[in-house]
Image: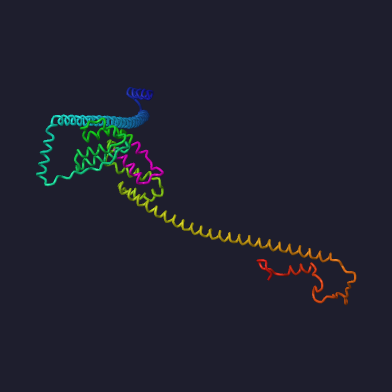
């Protein structure tokens, strides 16, 4: 490129100092234009290369900025999640401290009230009788008949594991305002027995009903945290020998305890219960039959009713099948019993037939022995010397008629016995 510029400069000088012919001038201008075009093309290539490099660097810069933006955004989200988690824990800790402070204040207030009540009773012990008497007289004047004093039927409390249910019953009686507090307090004291009754010895004689319940709560109440109760809830499964009613009551009781501890919100209670109740049913056939009720987003109470109804229908159907099967089994047993009786009778008849056959064979043997013995005795009889026997021709016998004048031969007796027919009882036909 430098050589081209020098050459253009020299050619310009020469053209300016020397007188050239027109052909030489034309040739000089042509050479000058070609050199300028060459310089311009070289400069365009370099410019294009630089522009391409700049464009590639800008694209790379944009990609790096986008990557940096994504990472900064992810980092901000992470910091926000960490901040939310920290804020949630701090809030839980503050709520826990406030609840503990509230409980301590309540206990302090109740103790202060108890102290004030005992002091008032000590100071006004002398005037109590007169005030009550005046009040009774006033009531008698206002009311012709005295008001009815109802005695509450307080359930017995001797098992510490049943404290929560017993406490709910007592709180329900207090909120109903049907009974007088003094009567209700005495009935509650009388209802406590067994191991929990030892707690009453730590209370004053003037302890109010609220004092008694608070002391019982501190000794026998639920001390599990809300998180522990929810962990127990999520790990709960229907037991093998547990019906669906008991299963529903058990998980509902867990959720209520967690709700009292402030672990879950009231509006989420129903969804959590219905999902847990249906998902962990042990009977897969019942679960498949009630899937449509679960997917229709019914409430927990409605879902439980449908599941119980379906279980009852399945039980009735199963009982019908078992009844039919039992009837078929009874019929088969009856047929088998008849068949066994016939078999026994046939066996008995076969035994009788065998006995008769043996008796018949024995009689035949005895007859053969008797015939043989008589034949021998006849042959051994002495022969007279002057006895004569006459015959008239071949095969003539001097006796007339079969066996006349002589005893039958053994073979004749045998043929007669063999040809005779006998009945099954041994008599001759």
- The quadrant of the rendering that contains the N terminus is top left
> Colour mode?
rainbow
Looking at the image, is 134 positioned above or below residue 305?
above
Q: Position of residue 405 (x, y in %)?
A: 82, 73
Q: Residue at x 88, y 73 (%)?
A: 389
Q: Is residue 152 above or below residue 54?
A: below
Q: Is residue 68 above or below residue 143?
A: above
Would you say residue 231 sits in the magenta stretch? yes
Residue 32 lies in the magenta stretch: no
| Image side of residue 326 versus residue 136, left or right | right
Q: Residue at x 27, y 34 (%)?
A: 216
In percent of width and height, residue 343 lies at 58, 60
Q: Is residue 272 above or below residue 68?
A: below
Using the rendered view, name the quadrant where residue 36 is placed.
top left
Front position in the image: 116 or 92 = 116
| Picture coordinates of residue 134, whole percent (x, y) | 10, 38
In the picture, residue 180 is in which quadrant? top left
* Magenta span: chief secondary structure: helix
The quarter of the image holding the C terminus is: bottom right
Q: Which region shows up in magenta?
A: 230-258
User: Is residue 70 or residue 110 the one in the foreground?
Assistant: 110
The percent position of residue 69, horizontal first and vertical second, equals: 31, 31
């Amino acid at each position: 490129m430098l050589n081209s510029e020098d050459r253009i400069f020299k050619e310009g000088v020469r053209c300016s100092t020397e007188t050239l012919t027109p052909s030489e001038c034309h040739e000089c201008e042509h050479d000058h234009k070609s050199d300028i075009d060459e310089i311009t093309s070289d400069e365009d290539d370099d410019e294009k290369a630089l522009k391409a490099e700049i464009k590639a660097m800008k694209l790379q810069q944009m990609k790096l900025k986008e990557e940096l933006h994504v990472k900064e955004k992810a980092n901000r989200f992470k910091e926000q999640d960490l901040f939310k988690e920290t804020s949630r824990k701090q809030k839980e800790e503050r709520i826990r401290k406030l609840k503990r402070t509230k409980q301590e204040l309540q206990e302090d207030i109740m103790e202060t009230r108890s102290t004030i009540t005992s002091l008032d009773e000590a100071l006004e012990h002398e005037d109590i009788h007169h005030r009550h008497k005046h009040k009774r007289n006033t009531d008698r004047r206002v009311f012709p008949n005295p008001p009815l004093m109802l005695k509450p039927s307080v359930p017995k409390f001797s098992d510490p594991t049943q404290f929560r249910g017993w406490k709910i019953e007592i709180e329900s009686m207090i909120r109903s305002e049907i009974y007088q507090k003094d009567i209700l307090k005495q009935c509650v004291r009388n209802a406590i027995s067994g191991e929990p009754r030892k707690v009453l010895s730590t209370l004053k004689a003037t302890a109010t009903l609220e004092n008694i319940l608070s002391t019982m709560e501190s000794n026998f109440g639920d001390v599990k945290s809300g998180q522990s109760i929810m962990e127990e809830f999520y790990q709960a499964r229907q037991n093998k020998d547990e019906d669906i009613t008991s299963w529903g009551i058990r998980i509902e009781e867990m959720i209520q305890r967690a709700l009292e501890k402030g672990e879950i919100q009231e509006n989420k209670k129903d969804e959590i219960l219905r999902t847990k109740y249906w998902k962990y049913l042990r009977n897969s056939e019942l679960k498949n039959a009630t899937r449509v009720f679960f997917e229709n987003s019914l409430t927990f109470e409605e879902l439980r009713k449908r599941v119980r109804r379906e279980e009852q229908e399945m039980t009735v159907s199963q009982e019908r099948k078992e009844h039919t099967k039992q009837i078929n089994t009874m019929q088969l047993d009856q047929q088998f019993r008849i068949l066994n009786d016939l078999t026994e009778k046939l066996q008995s008849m076969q035994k009788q037939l065998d006995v008769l056959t043996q008796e018949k064979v024995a009689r035949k043997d005895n007859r053969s022995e008797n015939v043989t013995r008589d034949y021998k005795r006849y042959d051994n009889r002495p022969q007279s010397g002057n006895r004569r026997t006459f015959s008239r021709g071949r095969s003539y016998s001097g006796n007339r008629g079969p066996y006349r004048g002589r005893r039958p031969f053994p073979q004749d007796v045998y043929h007669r016995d063999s040809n005779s027919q006998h009945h099954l009882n041994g008599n001759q036909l």
